[in-house]
Image: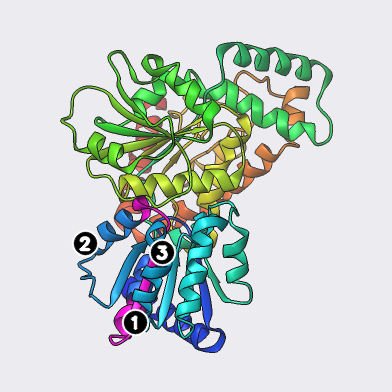
Amino acid sequence: MAENLQEYYKRMAEAIDTQLEQKGKAALFYPVGSGSGRIVWAWINAHPDAAVIWVVPGETRRGMRLEEAKRIGQEIPPRVQMIHCEDNTPQRCLELAKIRPACIILDGSREFTAFPCGERVRWLQRFSPQAKLLGLIDTDQPVSCCLAEAMFQGAGMFSISLTEALARGLVTPPAADTVLLWPAETALEEFRIQMKQWNAVGVPGVGEKVFTNLRRAVEKCGPALPRLREALPKGKQLVLCEDAAAMRRVTENLEALFGPDTEATILKDGWDQEMAVRFAASPARGAQVLVTVSTPGGLARLAGMAGAVLVRSTGLEQNHRRMLARALALCGDSAPLVELNVSFAGLRNAEDLVQGTEQAGGTGFPLEEPYQACIRPARQKTGSTDFGNVMRHVPGTCIRVAFVPEGAAAHSQEYLDAGKTEAAHNAVVYGAKILALTGAQLIENPEKLEAIKKEFHENLAKELHGQS
């Protein structure tokens, strides 16, 4: 589904232009880092005589836009006035009105508080009534400004989800995503006790799915902290926490998480672009982490970041996508990610995102889950099967897709119950995909097929020779 991005930006700029002409206002609902700024620049460049007032709610977002323009080689012409909302006094509005702006851009308009920023935007509109209104709204931001919402009532709306942005290539996916379960040891032990109790009495109805997934997660994931260090690339890490509680959990366990002598820069009062840039620019030395809570706001890319850790407290899908978009915006293209889930419910968010991206026509990103299917070596001895008779005449392979817990006995009630679960249905789908893709690869690679046949005949000849 990926298309030429320049053509996409141009096409969206034309669609915005139509809405501005018809309704006098339009709004872009795009995830952080998915190209809303580039669409605006495409619109500005298509109107070389139009004066524009670009209003930002803070220096962080202003810095992000300036850095973005520099990165894409976009010169900011004098006819484009990028102003901080707090500097927008009545006198300043009168001065700006003299350039007769064709458009006023509210960048991150949900960040504008009703007073004073919202009212100052109204001043701009009063003094420049001919100006059309364009809003850039991050889809992951909470509704925090009723005045800004009212401004765009009836506007032409353009929105895109993170899955669509990934599928279109507007957002570069992470190089890899490792999903880990990180409960406290006491909570993990309680999980195991609870599972034993559920296993003893049976788990009918809706609880069966929860039980099955929980058991798989706890039994398969193993200790999260050693795997965290294995998954993290060497270098500086961004640690993005879902909330203050997750941030406290990280700061209390820095050494356990990232190793001894970890050097941490902790943004206790929310995102601080200046401190973040200093951290990214500092000399590399040992384990270095930048810890912050995931908050709304413009996010300029940080040079020199090796990857990001998302510390999750809930299983809310919208929070996961918000955090992932921000991590990619900050760390750059193809940053490897590690997700630490305090809540079991968050373990499926990454897989849902990958599946959504693929359904939208894109390509998913590498995902390592705590209970991801693993490929085991071939078994030397297996139970009897009629397929063995077939394999005396043609080469073949007998693949088994696991859907029961480790150690489950065949022909048992546990095995029977497992066959009714979602995991069993998934195993059928996995098996079908393996068969189909294996066949397709052999058709596309006849040399491999010939090598398989040769090996088959050689092994059969050895076996027959040994029997004679």
For the residue pair 118 and 200, the one nearer the viewer reads as: 118
**Who comes first in sequence, dot 3 or dot 2?**
2
Residue 70 is tagged as 2
Q: Residue furthest left?
A: 283
Look at the numbered disc 2 and give the secondary structure of its residue: helix
For the residue pair 410 and 347, the one nearer the viewer reads as: 347
Q: How many neighbours does mark 1 have within 10 angstroms: few (below 14), some (14-19), or many (20 or more)?
A: few
Q: Residue at x 66, y 20 (%)?
A: 408
Residue highlighted by disc 1: 98
Q: Position of residue 255 (x, y in %)?
A: 36, 15
Can you say which quadrant of the picture contains the C terminus? top left
For badge 1, the amino acid type reads Lys
Residue 229 visible, this orientation: yes
Look at the numbered disc 1 and give the secondary structure of its residue: loop
Res 206 → quadrant: top right
**Who comes first in sequence, dot 1 or dot 2?**
2
Q: Position of residue 197 (x, y in %)?
A: 77, 14
Q: Disc 3 and disc 1: Cα gap in Å?
A: 15 Å
Up-down relation of residue 357 to residue 14 (above or below): above
Foreground label between 3 and 2: 3
Q: Is residue 243 magenta?
A: no
Q: Disc 3 and disc 2: Cα gap in Å?
A: 28 Å
Residue highlighted by disc 3: 89
Region rendered in magenta: 42-61
Q: Residue at x 58, y 70 (%)?
A: 151
Q: Position of residue 144 (x, y in %)?
A: 59, 53
For the residue pair 314 and 211, the one nearer the viewer reads as: 314
Can you say which quadrant of the picture contains the N terminus? bottom left
Look at the numbered disc 3 and give the secondary structure of its residue: loop
Q: How many neighbours does mark 3 have within 10 angstroms: few (below 14), some (14-19), or many (20 or more)?
A: some
Horizontal side of residue 311 vs 188, given as left or right: left
Residue 51 is tagged as none
